[in-house]
Image (cartoon, rainbow, N blue to C red):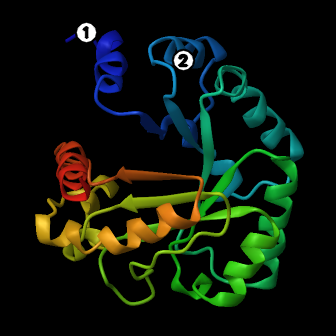
Amino acid sequence: MPRREWLSYYAREFNALELNVTFYALPRLSILEAMVAKTGDGFLFSVKANQEMTHQRQHDSKVFTAFVHMLQPFIDSGKLGCVLAQFPYSFSFSRQNRDYLAIFRERLGDLPVVVEFRNVQWLGGEVFEWLRSHNLGFCCVDEPQLPKLLPPVAEVTSNIGYVRFHGRNAAKWWQHEHAYERYDYTYSVAELREWLPRINKLNSLAEKTFIFANNHWRGQAIDTIRQLRVTVD
């Protein structure tokens, strides 16, 4: 299948896409306009914040202005589901980092934002209440149960529920040649069923819930969502 047809084919079965390319560089508006045209009504994009905003944590407002400008095709078409701000494990809980999140929220205006933490220090009622007060969504994760990583909790702190299935490849999470190797994992049906009560909780509290699979190294993500869909049904 020609590459130009991939998104249209994907959109026949799925109604949302997590866009990762924006983490590395901001695409031309024409590329995003083409993505909008290749998806039907009701299709939504979750757009990952650029690494300068989450990993390098630039305080330059021009970085945020350029990112928001890039989102315009999704905003104009009503296909922006949210912005996903994935912070690294090194982004630990501190007043300085919490203040940065407040700046992050302010510079994205009223756009829907979901925050993914990789450090368990952020897990707690005080943080959840702070996220709610700033209208920042909380990203629930399924990942290896290693020390200081987040456990599989279900929490909603905005009108958006969000889950990312990263896989449970504990052996490769920290020890790998290439970063994508950590996501080489195939879920069992039993493992996915563990999430049914959590997903039901998210659905009961949020206006919309996004569920994405990030165990993508060998294409397992598609089967993860297909199996989960059958399990939920």
Q: Position of residue 130 (x, y in %)?
A: 77, 78
Q: Where is residue 62, by image quadrant? A: top right
**In this picture, is 48 found above or below 137?**
above
Look at the numbered disc 1 and give the secondary structure of its residue.
loop
Q: Residue at x 87, y 55 (%)?
A: 106
Q: Nearer the viewer, residue 35 or 20?
A: 35
Q: Residue at x 63, y 46 (%)?
A: 83
Look at the numbered disc 2 and give the secondary structure of its residue.
helix
Q: Position of residue 104 (x, y in %)?
A: 79, 57
Structural crowding at the residue carrying mark 2, measured as other residues with C-alpha within 10 Å and reported as few (<14), some (14–19) or many (≥20) = many
Q: Residue at x 48, y 61 (%)?
A: 203
- 92 sits left or right of 167 in the view: right
Contact flag, marks 2 and 1 (Cβ < 8 Å)? no
Q: Residue at x 57, y 66 (%)?
A: 205
The N terminus, quarter of image = top left
Q: CA distance from mark 2 to mark 1?
A: 18 Å
- 124 sits left or right of 167 in the view: right
Structural crowding at the residue carrying mark 1, measured as other residues with C-alpha within 10 Å and reported as few (<14), some (14–19) or many (≥20) = few
Q: Nearer the viewer, mark 2 or mark 1?
A: 2
The residue carrying mark 2 is: 36
**In this picture, is 35 found above or below 47?**
above
Tell me if I can see residue 97 in this picture: no
* Among numbered discs 2 and 1, the one appearing first in the sequence: 1
Tell me if I can see residue 93 in this picture: yes
- 192 sits left or right of 100 in the view: left
Q: Name which residue type carries label 2.
A: Val
**In this picture, is 137 found above or below 47?**
below
Q: Name which residue type carries label 1.
A: Pro
Q: Position of residue 145 (x, y in %)?
A: 31, 83
**Mark number, residue 2:** 1
